[in-house]
Amino acid sequence: MSAHDHDLKIFSSCPIAAQIRPESCISELQEFARSSEAAGHEGTLVFTDNSQLDPWLVSQVIVEATEHLCPLVAIQPAYMHPYSVAKMIASFAHLHGRRLWLNMVAGGFKNDLTALNDLTPHDERYARLLEYTTVIQSLLQSADPVSFDGRYYKVTNLKLTPPLPAELMPGVLVSGSSEAGMDAARKLKATAIEYPKPPAEYSAPLPANIAGRGIRIGIIARSENAGAWSVARARYPEDRRGQLTHQLAMKVSDSSWHRQLSELGNTAVGADNPYWLVPFQNYKAVCPFLVGSYDRVADEVARYVDVGYRTFILDVPASVEEMHHTGKVFERALARCAVA
C-alpha cells in the first residue's frame, strides 16, 4: 500500500539553505534531496523570504541531485513578475523534463514586506495573488499570446517560450487558513493548505467545495510513546526567549494561521494526545506536531486522511533518519485507511 494508492502527496521541507555553512551547502542539500526522494516523497518545499537563498537556485540543486523529486517552490509576488515565474517553470521543464509545484505565498513576515514597501492589506494580497497566479497559469497553458487586464497585473500579447508540455503543468498550493485564502484556492482550482486542528475535532468529512485539501505538520515518532516524547522534548525544549519572540510575532502579524494556532495553544499533551504545539509556541517551528508511537501517530494521520486531507507538507526533518521514522507512520496510516 503506497501513498499513490490513496492519491496522497507527501512533501518534505528543505533545510534552510542560508543556515548551512557555504562550503557544505550544496552537498547537504543534495543528500537531503536524495533522501527525500528515497522516502517516496512527491517533492520538497523550498522556502522564500528576505533571509533565504533564492528558491530557484536551491531548486536547481535539488533537481540535479534527483531523478523524480519535484521542488515545491514558494512564490512571493513581491519578488518576481509572473512572466518570470512562468519562464522559470518552462525552463526547468525544457532543461530537466521535471515538473515543479508552486506554493503561492500571499504574505510573509511583516517586516520583510515593509522593507519592500509592500503595504497591501491581508485580503487584498490574496486578490493580488489570484491575478498573479492566473497570469502564470495562462502563460503556461496557452499556445497563443496572452493578454490580461487586472487591478494588479496587465500583460498584452505576451507569449511564453519555450512552451510547457501539458504533462509538466505545475500543481498549485495556496494557504487555506483564511476565507480569502480559501476563496483564492477555489478560483484557482488549487490545493488549500491548512495548519490543522487536533484530528478529534473533525467530526465530519471536509466540504467538497475545493479541488484539494492539505495540511502542514511535523511528526516525531518512535516505536514507543515514551521514546518519541523524550526525543521531542530534547529537540524542542521550552525557551523563554522563544516564547517572547512568539508573543511579539503575534502582535505584529496579520496571519490567520498564526492566530488560529495560538488559540489552540492550551491543548493538553501526553500519551493520549499526540497533538503538540510547544515548538510553535517557542518559535522553533511554524506548524503543529504529532508526537508518539508509530501506531498512535498513524491513527491520527489516518484520521486526517479519512476526513479528506490528501496533501501533507512535513516540517524540516532533524536528520535523514527522521524521514525513516516518519515513513513508518505513513505506511501504517495508509494500511488503516485501506482497512477502513
Image (tube, grey):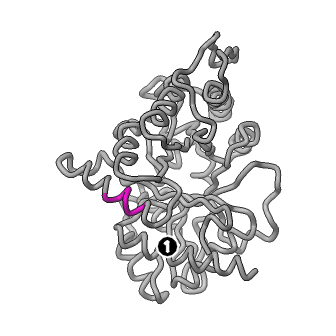
The residue positioned 42% from the left and 65% from the top of the image is 38
Q: Measuring from the top left, give residue 292's x and y in whole percent.
A: 51, 81
Q: Secondary structure at mark 1?
A: helix
Q: Measuring from the top left, give residue 209's x and y in whole percent.
A: 82, 50
Residue 337 falls in image quadrant:
bottom right
The residue positioned 40% from the left and 46% from the top of the image is 63
Q: Quadrant of the N terminus?
A: bottom right
Residue 34 falls in image quadrant:
bottom left
Q: Nearer the viewer, residue 109 or 217?
A: 217
Task: Decide if residue 151 is on the left or right side of residue 324.
Answer: right
The residue pinned by badge 1 equals: 327
Q: Is residue 33 inside the magenta stretch?
A: yes
Q: Measuring from the top left, give residue 113's x and y in whole percent.
A: 48, 31
Q: Nearer the viewer, residue 158 or 315?
A: 158
Classify mark 1: residues with Cα within 10 Å, few (<14), some (14-19) or many (20+): some
The residue positioned 59% from the left and 45% from the top of the image is 255
Q: Nearer the viewer, residue 259 or 11?
A: 11
Residue 324 can be seen in this image: yes
Q: Is residue 321 inside the magenta stretch?
A: no
Residue 264 falls in image quadrant:
bottom right
Magenta stretch, overall SS: helix
In this view, 152 is above or below 219: above
In this view, 197 is above or below 169: below
Q: Looking at the image, which residue sits at the far top?
A: 156
Task: Decide if residue 256 is on the left or right side of residue 63.
Answer: right
Residue 262 can be seen in this image: no
Q: Measuring from the top left, give residue 20's x and y in whole percent.
A: 26, 51
Task: Decide if residue 319 is on the left or right side of residue 184.
Answer: left
Report the amino acid beneath label 1. Answer: Gly
Q: Quadrant of the C terminus?
A: bottom right
The residue range painted magenta reads 31-36
